[in-house]
Image (spheres, grey):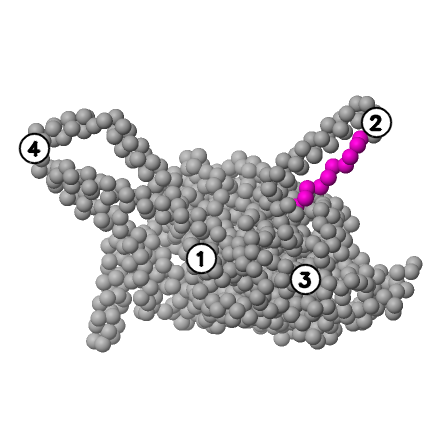
Amino acid sequence: MELLLSVVSSILLLFCLLSLVRRAVDRWLCRRCYLLDYVCYKPSDDRKLPTDRCSEVIMRNPRLRLPDYKFLLKVVVNSGISEETYGPRSIIVGRREERPSMADCYEEVDDCAFATLDQLFRRTGIPPSRVDLLVVNVSMFAPAPSLASRIINRYGMRDDVKSFNLAGMGCSASPIAVDLVSNVFRSRKGMVALVFTSESIAPNWYSGSDRSMMLGNCLFRSGGCSFMLTNDGSLRHRAKMRLNCLVRTHIGANDEAYGCAIQKEDDVGRVGFHLGKNLPKAAVRAFTENMQRLAPKVLPIGELALHAVRVLRHRLLKAAATNSKEPAAGNERVVNFKTGVEHFCLHTGGAAVIDAVGKGLGLNKYDVEPARMTLHRWGNTSASSLWYVLGYMEAKKRLRKKERVMMISFGAGFKCNSCVWEVLRDLDGGDGGVWEDCIGRYPQQTLVNPFLKKFGWVNEE
Amino acid sequence: MTSSSEPLPEFLSSVKLKYVKLGYRYVISKLVTLVLIPVMAALLLEALKLDPAEVVSLWRRAQGMSAVHTLATVFLLVLVATAYFMSRPRPIFLVDFACFLPAPNCRVPFATYLEHARLMPFFDEKSVRFQLRILERSGLGEETCLPPDNHYIPPRNSLGTARAEAELVIFSALDQLIAKTGLKPKDVDILVVNCSLFSPTPSLSAMVVNRYKLRSNILSFNLSGMGCSAGLISIDLARDLLQAHPNSYALVVSTEIITPNYYTGNERSMLLPNCLFRMGAAAVLLSNRRRDRGRAKYRLLHVVRTHRGADDQAYRCVNEEEDRDGNSGISLSKDLMAIAGEALRTNITTVGPLVLPVTEQLRFLASLVRRRLIMAGARPGWRPYIPDFTRAFEHFCIHAGGRAVIDELQRNLRLSSEHVEASRMALHRFGNTSSSSLWYELGYIEAKGRMRRGDRVWMIGFGSGFKCNSAVWRCLRSVETPVEGPWAECIHRYPVDIPEVVKLL
């Protein structure tokens, strides 16, 4: 009797312990977020927007005067964008720019979504019925039923798929979608998530004459990306990267920051996307705050300690200088992120943005090259730009096992979101993706627009 | 919705093997309990067989154990117990919620609606008569409200006016919620906003962050295009986020902005939303902090989502499109009721095993088995067993999409008129407020003083896609009749009797 009691009780205790351990292990495994694959969108060549076509489109707006044309062409010529970026078909052919039809809007999104998703399913070999979570992010086009439902319909996904359709979240929505996925992953193991991110230009084309709103027309280009994430350990061997950490910063509490990139109506009631003059200031604030929170998560202790010492030294010197009324010696040096991260995917918001962020992170020409070249080849494709930059690095065979990749982007609100991935295996086997046909020509030494000769007069004032 | 001549399909006529699989999974998850019970029973029997002398000797032996031995055993037991309790999923509490109460000057009685419709330059005579017939049968009352800019002829539709409506409804609801709960905006960790038909950039969630000066490390999400069931989708997202982040507050805001969505054409299938959709918003505070258990009203038990988008017919039955003249609006197809029934059926097959008492589940399983066994010799007119959901829930909040939806659900789920009273009265007083309607209905039940501790509430939402989402809540404390809120002024007049047809002309 006693023996039975002790044997049974010890078995039960062991069983309880084992199941608890198993639960804890499962929960820890659920936190893993692997990137299986990603596919960027390459529109067809008839949608290319070289400078002369840009000028055609600009001239079509009857509300603009000569100074406005000059301003716009100057923006286009100096933007660092090449002749090979893409625009929406309906705008290029001049079809209903002022009131685009729903059919045009759907056509623009369908082209991108279905092309990238078809390829993604093919490459990963994972059928649509295996997808448990779907996140769609198209900031400026949110019809009902949602684009998420549209994708579920097209691919016949299961009826218990969790879908989320994010809208209005701006150019920094890629890390937001990844954040959503990694949080939902913690609730269940063995999940596969599909994310589609793009931007809709056709319904948001500005046809007025407010300069701050015309910038959007000049800089945004068509593009998109679909990627697949999973927390299923059995798919780990196929995964390319693993998510290490993610930091989101939202400084919308500040009125100036909230209003610096906002969709609104101009004086005569035309809707456009206003980019304010204080946008760089908001970007710097959000960026600084984000980096302050990210640094402890990615940098090695040595660099953090060194930076703390530097800051302390600078403060002491400054205090000493003010006391003795002598000029302070030495500047406060920036944190060297390269001690913790090897590759940088910077949002291709514009040449100035890339340069400023590069300087803030202490990067050299080699580090910002992927972002500059992506801006040159694809323009500002909004939230999907980070994936084109990643594609460049992969096409150039830069990504090696155990290296870390940082993605950082900015968006309306004002937000700055960043995430750090760890590469799981040497990514030198695949084709170049969307960069396949042109990677040989990069990096280009001069990014000057070839039409500078023809339109160079815009720079003379 | 127009009362369709087609009834909802019988729910359970073709339930798949899914139910059996669910049952199996249920058994496996309770395996430990099932194994433990006979073992404990056996031990108890053995213990009872012992005579007092043996019990005394056992006790002496136990006392004689070395201190280390005892300490180790106790420590192990405590460790296991703690680990067990800490590994359980965090409970999600609904601390409180608030609904927007429109000002009386936004009211649109039938006479006003029809007069405006006649004066609108874009409606022809047939469209006006059609809208009249819809209103007569709609189940709406005379106090539903449209946003101020919709009172103009023609309505003032612009980005500015849409933003103004959003600010009005969302900020009112949030101000009320903050006053009721004493919430400090800086304490909010998660924010989810859903608004189907209006999504400016920056998003409405950024607008809330800006107005209430929320923290810079907030996790904000803005869902759009997800239809009338998006309120429960937001709750689902907030729940997943709260599971991942301990000690947090989540704010969920559900609304639908009417201003930019007034249909200005003459297509019949697209005129219905004009007649039924009204202004509304709800703000909900969720928490996973254990100290909120004392003051929270409800606890979230389950959220089940069903998406029928893979079926083309279901996908297109609620569709935003343009008519021949290029006017955009929401078109509702004639087989909406059938599709809603299909979606509900699928949803119920997942919700049922989670909430129904064992007897109901066994009965249902038996009926299923019987049907499969005697398929060949099935008597015509044999009715499948519909589980009695009133044994699982005390209160029902059915999306007030329209009178026909509520009628059909009442019939098919065998609910009494008291069970659907909240939905009917919310439709009557506030109209179809889309994703926030479920919260107005919950507010009605509370205002009537019917919510008691331990009561379970089933919220069912339908929406474009086609989706059917359910949430199950348990009431944690008896809710006193609120002195403020959207129902405070008018609850004494309810329930009202709503005739089948209200003759307007």
Dot 3 or dot 2: first in sequence order is 2
Task: Mark 3: give few (<14), some (14-19) or many (20+) Cα within 10 Å.
Answer: many
Circle 2 or circle 1, nearest the eye: 2
- Chain name for mark 3: A
Q: Nearer the viewer, mark 3 or mark 2?
A: 2
Marks 2/1: CA–CA distance:
61 Å
In the rendered image, which residue does mark 3 sit on? A381
Query: Given contact means CB atoms under 8 Å apart, are the residues at marks 4 and 2 in contact?
Result: no
**Viewer-nearest residue: B193 or B243:** B243
Q: Circle 1 is placed at which residue position?
A: A232
Q: Quadrant of residue B263?
A: bottom right
Q: Which residues are magenta?
A: A328-337
The residue that mark 2 highlights is A326
Q: Nearer the viewer, residue B245 or B356?
A: B245
Q: Report the front residue among A184 and A229.
A: A229
- For label 4, the residue is B51
